[in-house]
Image (spheres, helix red, strand yellow):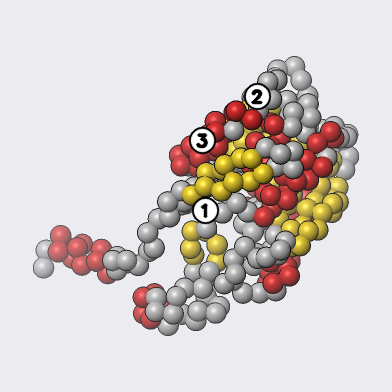
Amino acid sequence: MSSDDEALIDSAIFQEPSGYYPPPKLATFESRTLQSGETLRLRLVGHNPLWVRLRPPPADDWLCRTYKLRRSTDVFFRPQGHHLWNGAQVVTDYLHDHKESLVRGRDILELGAGAGLPSIAAAIWGAKNVVVTDYPDEDLVENMMINVNAATDVFPSSSSIIAVQGHVWGADAEPLLANLPSGGRRGFDTLVLADLLFNHSQHAALVSTIQATLSRSPDAKALVFFTPYTPWKFDKDMAFFDLARQGGFEVNQVVKRVMDKVMFKDDRGDELLRRTVFGYELSWNDLNV
């Protein structure tokens, strides 16, 4: 047998069978009416390399049959990027209710923005500069740009300056800070993080980015809103705030809202937790450090 034949056999062994992965989801649209009356039609990207959640595989899944995986406990990944997440909706309402102190005339940065709902709303409500970011994947960045451009007709005449940018959490923050006017305060007045805490391995990177981008001023706030979609890992979600405290931040809970229904009805775990959005504000504990 030739080496080429052996290579073909080896590659075939590790190839998933046809139809193993579900077909990529197409982009969808969802309308959201803001508390101020404007209706936004948001494009939700169908698939990208990051937005996955732990889901049980189907009973007849090839991987389960071959390796005898237990459906109730084993890890299985399915893309879930085609949703307007609860955290983004609730933090948007919170920005509206506190727009005089958190939005108007302020520089705002959103991390892991997805569709960019909070950022677009902030621009409508009078933010000075808004930077909308997510992982630097072409589809993600393009989707944010599409939503920002689609909302231009509802921006006020004295519109905010909006930038769309890819960013990896924990990476150099200078490209983000470069969007701010020179000569001003070094950092953003309001940061928005909505439904990011499920990514436990990235907590330290998120704290690092907050440290690098949040203005060192007494009124600077980072808003961290999330739902424990995997409630058996709620303690791991909450561990983010321990890291934040260690990183020099004061942490205060400001919201606890129970939604009408769960986002993912087939998921397991405490239903009340899966319907609950928790909101926290981070501020600098010591401005002199």
Disc 3 is placed on an element classified as: helix
Mark 2 surroundings within 10 Å by alpha-carbon count, few (fewer than 14), some (14 through 19), many (20 or more) = some
Identify the residue shown where x is 18% and y is 65%. Answer: 6
Residue at the disc numbered 2: 161
How many angstroms separate mark 3 from mark 1 (CA)?
A: 15 Å
Drawn side of residue 156 relative to residue 4, left or right: right
**Which mark is on residue 146?**
3
How many angstroms separate mark 3 from mark 2 (CA)?
A: 16 Å
- Relative to 152, residue 26 above or below: below
Q: Position of residue 111 (x, y in %)?
A: 64, 42
Count the labels in the image: 3
Drawn side of residue 52 relative to residue 202, left or right: left
Identify the residue shown where x is 46% and y is 48%. Answer: 27
Q: Position of residue 243 (x, y in %)?
A: 76, 53
Residue at the disc numbered 1: 82
Quadrant into which the N terminus falls: bottom left
| Residue at the top extreme of this rendering | 183
Identify the residue shown where x is 54% and y is 31%. Answer: 149
Q: Do the CB atoms of the residues marked 1 and 2 lie less than 8 Å apart? A: no
Mark 1 surroundings within 10 Å by alpha-carbon count, few (fewer than 14), some (14 through 19), many (20 or more) = many
Disc 2 is placed on an element classified as: strand
